[in-house]
Amino acid sequence: MIKIYNRKTNSYDIEQVSGEKYLNWTYNTPIGMSLLQIFLKRKVFSSLYGKYCDTRSSSKKIVSFVKDFNINMNEYELNLNDFKSFNEFFIRKIKSQYRPISRDKNIFISPGDGRISIYESIDLNKIVQVKGFHYSMKELINDDTIASLYNNGTCIILRLCPTDYHRFHFVDDGVCEDTIKINGQYYSVNPIALNKISKLYCQNKREWSLFHTENFGEVLYLEVGATCVGSIIQTYSPNKKMLKGDEKGYFKFGGSTIILFLQKDKVAIDKDILEQTSLGFETKVLMGEKIGLKFKRE
């Protein structure tokens, strides 16, 4: 059972986990862990499933998926019958009025829908994955020079579930450099897996890019693939001016994670999110939602 903090009700919701029985069996049984290491964590498994999700026959899953997870399709641009495959449904675009973007240059927003944890004053050699599991930024991006920009900075982890809107966006106006791709495994990023696999983010396939923002310093974007994520698709134009809220890219089928690194004293994170993170709970947020303010020295 995964409890998620709801900012609107000031209470906790129980997350509906897609494939929960499969995840528990895979990560909590000897046979499941053996199969994971031999086959399930490897690219071939996720690629095959990703290709299936591109087929017309996979569209048969859409109606039951929407019903089982109570997805409000009124928020999206297309209707259920418009999708020719499950992946077309999975990367559905949302109507702009349901994810408004504040033009206030002092407001720092979430880059996507998901469950967020935020850590301040990070030690680059001991970044928190979950309680008891840590990793280093050097292992994560393989670039010591870039990593050094974020000593004592802030780490934002946004976990996307298969039920979420799976496009991610820019948090400010600015220019984003080219994407660096790092090959890796395809472990699940669900907390069930995060509590079992050490340095999971450093083992999975991932992509990162440096975003030169106009109001919040140098922001490092990192997208992490996961089991059944067919692809991480970058849709932005590198080295060209992007606006706050513009789309950066999207994930094909599967739960995934976005990690942002902020430099020290650039953003004052909302206290409720920091408090819930310290208690061990993720907070549910939507793309464009305020999660902090531009840091101001007293």
Image: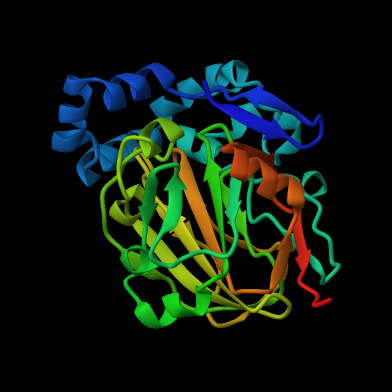
Q: Taking 225 as reference, is 143 above or below it? A: below
Instruction: Answer left or right for 258 relative to 268.
Output: left
Residue 251 in view here:
no
| Residue drawn at point x = 24 percent, y = 40 percent | 41
Image quadrant assignment for residue 114: top right
Residue 86 image offset from top left, x and y in percent:
47, 32
Image quarter in which the C terminus is found: bottom right
Q: Taking 178 as reference, is 81 above or below it? A: above
Count of marks overlaid on the render: 0
Instruction: Answer left or right for 286 relative to 16.
Output: right
| Residue drawn at point x = 81 percent, y = 29 percent | 9
Foreground of the two, 65 or 185: 185
Residue 27 image offset from top left, x and y in percent:
30, 27
| Residue drawn at point x = 45 percent, y = 52 percent | 128
Q: Taking 297 as reference, is 39 above or below it? A: above
Foreground of the two, 58 or 101: 101
Residue 78 in view here:
yes
Image quadrant assignment for residue 42: top left
What sort of colour scheme is used for the picture? rainbow
Residue 206 image offset from top left, x and y in percent:
37, 58
Foreground of the two, 155 or 102: 155
Residue 116 image offset from top left, x and y in percent:
61, 46
